[in-house]
Image (spheres, helix red, strand yellow):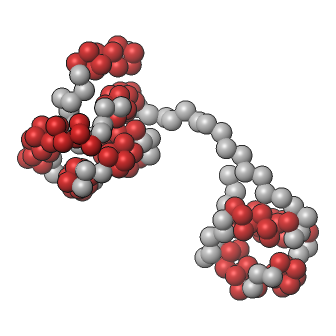
Amino acid sequence: MSSRSDVLRDVMRKTGTTQSQLSRVSGVRQSSISQALSGKLNLSDEQLDRLLSCMGYRLEVVRRPVVAELTRSERRSWQLHSRLSMHVTRSSLESWLPRVERNLQRLRDGVSGQPHVRNLDRWQSLIEHRDVLGLHRVLTGLDRDSIEMREVSPMGGLLPQDERADVLNLAG
């Protein structure tokens, strides 16, 4: 996928439009166009579409789902944590606190190095602030950051055993 600055540069090249000409027709300062082209200024899709329309083009944004590429272990962890996420509420978090805090301490005693220590600090912060939305994001996220957070998850032992067995049977 091309960056917004690449798209703008390409259309300007195709239409023979200079920065000065685009500035005059769009009302956008030439210095801002220059910064956008160099990547120093991040244009939104709306801003880029507006500039493109001045040159007879529209911006088409295509979104499509892509299956996340996870290792077997990462997928299994994601499935277990996603199932647990269905149970996370403010009140369940309160009832889980003693176990979660014990798990955090056990993990701190056995883990060293980054990013694990930093991620344990982040878990601690999520728990202390009762950040239910943040917990949902980490439990279900497919970004590298969430995957690494789950590697030192203090949420072990909270998913009911029958649900844990269901997830593991489906995971194969």
Residue, x 27% and y 43% (percent of image)? 90
Residue, x 28% and y 20% (percent of image)? 164
Describe residue 36's horizontal placement relative to residue 53 as left or right: left
Residue 53 occupies quadrant:
bottom right
Residue 70 occupies quadrant:
top left
Residue 47 occupies quadrant:
bottom right
Q: Position of residue 28 (x, y in %)?
A: 76, 81
Q: Kindly tell me whether residue 115 is visible in this rendering.
A: yes
Relative to residue 37, is residue 156 depicted above or below?
A: above
Position of the C terminus by quadrant: top left
Nearest to the observer: residue 31 or residue 101 = 101
Residue, x 33% and y 15% (percent of image)? 166
Q: Position of residue 4 (x, y in %)?
A: 69, 63
Q: Position of residue 106 (x, y in %)?
A: 9, 42
Q: Residue furthest front?
A: 91
Nearest to the observer: residue 53 or residue 90 = 90
Q: Kindly tell me whether residue 148 is visible in this rendering.
A: no
Describe residue 77's horizontal placement relative to residue 91 as left or right: right
Q: Position of residue 159 (x, y in %)?
A: 25, 26
Describe residue 48's horizontal placement relative to residue 148 as left or right: right
